[in-house]
Image (cartoon, rainbow, N blue to C red):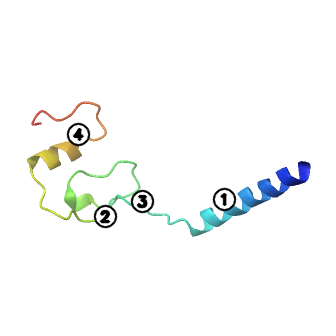
Amino acid sequence: MLLKLAVLGGLGYAGYKYYEKTRDGSSPAYAGGQGNSSIRDAGPAAMADKPKRQWNSVDQASDESFPASDPPANY
């Protein structure tokens, strides 16, 4: 029983170290030049992956209000 726990703990530690080594340090949602803040600027220009379609006013208002709990007024 104790040997199983030690092996399981060792595998978990090895997996964690592998994850830390291969993790990319950049934030996936931020475009280049956004800085190190925890909140990105609103709008499609601040996104790392450009949207597949043109944004409308609802998309822009929704992105500007995130992570607010209440939706924008133009819904």
Tag 3: amino acid:
Ser
Which residue is the site of mark 1? 16
Which residue is the site of mark 3? 27
Q: Which quarter of the image is occupied by the C terminus?
A: top left
**Does dot 4 land on a helix, a strand or a loop?**
helix
**Does dot 2 land on a helix, a strand or a loop?**
loop
Quick check: marks 1 and 2 in contact, CB under 8 Å?
A: no
Question: Residue 10, located in which quarter of the rendered image?
Answer: bottom right
> Gap in Å between the C-alphas at discs 4 and 1?
35 Å
Q: Say left or right for 54 vs 24.
A: left
Which residue is the site of mark 4? 65
Q: Residue at x 72, y 56 (%)?
A: 12
> Gap in Å between the C-alphas at discs 1 and 2?
26 Å
Which residue is the site of mark 2? 48
> Gap in Å between the C-alphas at discs 1 and 3?
19 Å
Label 1 CA crowd tier, 10 Å (few <14, some 14–19, many 20+): few
> Gap in Å between the C-alphas at discs 2 and 3?
9 Å
